[in-house]
Image (cartoon, rainbow, N blue to C red):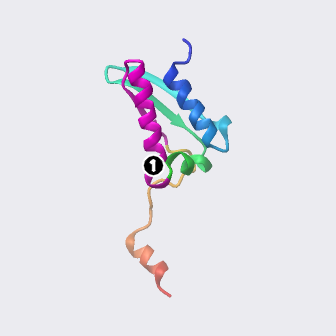
Amino acid sequence: MATEKDQAFLEFVVKELVDNPKDVKVVRAVDEMGVLLTLDISAEDMGKIIGRQGNTAKAIRTLLRVVGMKNNARVNLKINEPEGGKGPASRSVDEAMEDLKV
């Protein structure tokens, strides 16, 4: 099956934003809820795609909804945490407070 318009659009936008476009992978899945695009990128590019306070990711999701509406589909985006990514903080509050003591 040929690449769908929503998947091609996402790949184009993300590859233009990141430093490692060869690491961009988009998987498209369709179910009764609509279209789910799953994005995998390198750990170094994660901040560029998320943006400050998630604004870049929100903008990409909004644009994908517009592309979906033009094609009569509901499109959602899932951004996978890359291997070696920061992930959630694993330190306790006490450990963080110890670092602040002079």
Residue 94 vertical position relative to residue 17 in the rendered view, above or below: below
**Residue situated in front as seen by the camera: 61 or 46:** 61
Q: Main secondary structure of the magenta part?
A: helix
Q: Residue at x 47, y 85 (%)?
A: 101
Q: For mark 1, give the secondary structure.
A: helix
What range is drawn magenta here?
A: 52-80
Q: Residue 31 placed where, x, y %? A: 36, 20
Looking at the image, which residue is at 44% across and 62% down? 90
Question: Residue 92's quadrant in the figure?
Answer: bottom left
**66 is within the stretch colored magenta:** yes
Determine whether 23 is above or below 53 in the image: above
Percent across and percent down for residue 14 are 57, 37
Q: Residue at x 62, y 36 (%)?
A: 15
* Residue 67 spot, x, y in % from top left: 45, 26
Q: Circle 1: is it few (<14), some (14-19), or many (20+) Cα within 10 Å?
A: few
Q: Quadrant of the N terminus?
A: top right
64 relative to 91, above or below: above
Mark 1 = which residue?
A: 55
